[in-house]
Image (cartoon, rainbow, N blue to C red):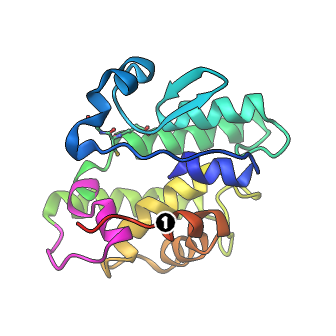
Amino acid sequence: MSVFVALHEKGLPFALSTVDLGRYANRAQDFAVPSLTQRVPMLVHDGFALSESSAITEYLDEVFPATPVYPADPRVRARARQVQAWLRSDLMPIRQERSTEVLFYGPTPTALSDAAQASAAKLFAASEALLAAGSPNLFGEWCIADMDLALMLNRLVLNGDPVPQRPADYATRQWQRPSVQRWVALKRPAL
Ligand SMILES: N[C@@H](CCC(=O)N[C@@H](CS)C(=O)NCC(=O)O)C(=O)O
C-alpha cells in the first residue's frame, strides 16, 4: 500500500501486477529470484528489482525527487523513517488480531487480547506524542509515514475498537487522502 500511495503521490506512471501468495507465486523463479526476499511488494524500475516497501519508497524519493514523500530536513526525515521502521517491526499482536482484512473487507467481532491491548497502548502513546494538537500530519507537510501510521491506527478505528480522539481523528482524515482512497477502492478477490 505504501509503495502504491508513494507512486501516486509522486505522479509516476506504473503498472500494478498482483502476486497470488495463497498459491505461493512469490516462490516461483520469476518472482523469487529478482525479489531476493520472496516478499511483496517488489518494484521493477528499468530492470532494477527491489523489495521491502520502505527501501522502495526511499529509492523512489532519491531517483524521482521532484515530489518528495519524505521530509527534507535530515532529522525530520530520520524521524519519519523511525516511525516506518517501528511500525514494520513491532505491534505484532495488533497486526495479527486486526489484519488488513479489517481495513479492506470488514470488521471482526473478536475482542483484543491483553497483548494486543498492550500494543495498542504503546501505539496510542507514540501517536499522541508525535501529533501536535490539531495537526493533520505528523511533520507539517504530509509524508509517507503518515500513511503508515494511519494504517496501523485504522486497524483499530475501522474495527470499532476504542482509540483516543486525536489519533482517531488523524487516522480518519488521513484515510480520505485521494492516493489512499485509490488503494482502498481497488477491486479485491472474495475471501
Ligand atoms: N516489511 C516488509 C513486509 C513485506 C511482507 O510482509 N510481505 C508479505 C505480504 S504482506 C509477503 O510477501 N508474504 C509472503 C511470504 O513472506 O512468503 C515490507 O514492508 O515490504
As drawn, 130 above or below 172 = above
Amino acid at dot 1? Leu
Tell me which residue sits at (14%, 64%) in the image.
113
Q: Is residue 24 left or right of residue 139?
A: left
Give how far across and how far down residue 149 sits, in percent.
50, 57
Tell me which residue sits at (56%, 57%) in the image.
147
Tell me which residue sits at (17%, 57%) in the image.
115
Q: Is residue 59 left or right of residue 72?
A: left
Check if residue 103 falls in the magenta segment: yes
As drawn, 187 above or below 38 = below
As drawn, 97 above or below 157 = above
Region in magenta: 95-112
Front position in the image: 35 or 137? 35
Q: Is residue 141 left or right of residue 15?
A: right
Give how far across and how far down residue 131 sits, in percent.
60, 63
Q: Secondary structure at mark 1?
A: loop
Check if residue 110 falls in the magenta segment: yes
Give how far across and how far down residue 160 sits, in percent.
32, 82
Front position in the image: 63 or 80? 63
- Quarter-of-image position of residue 135: bottom right
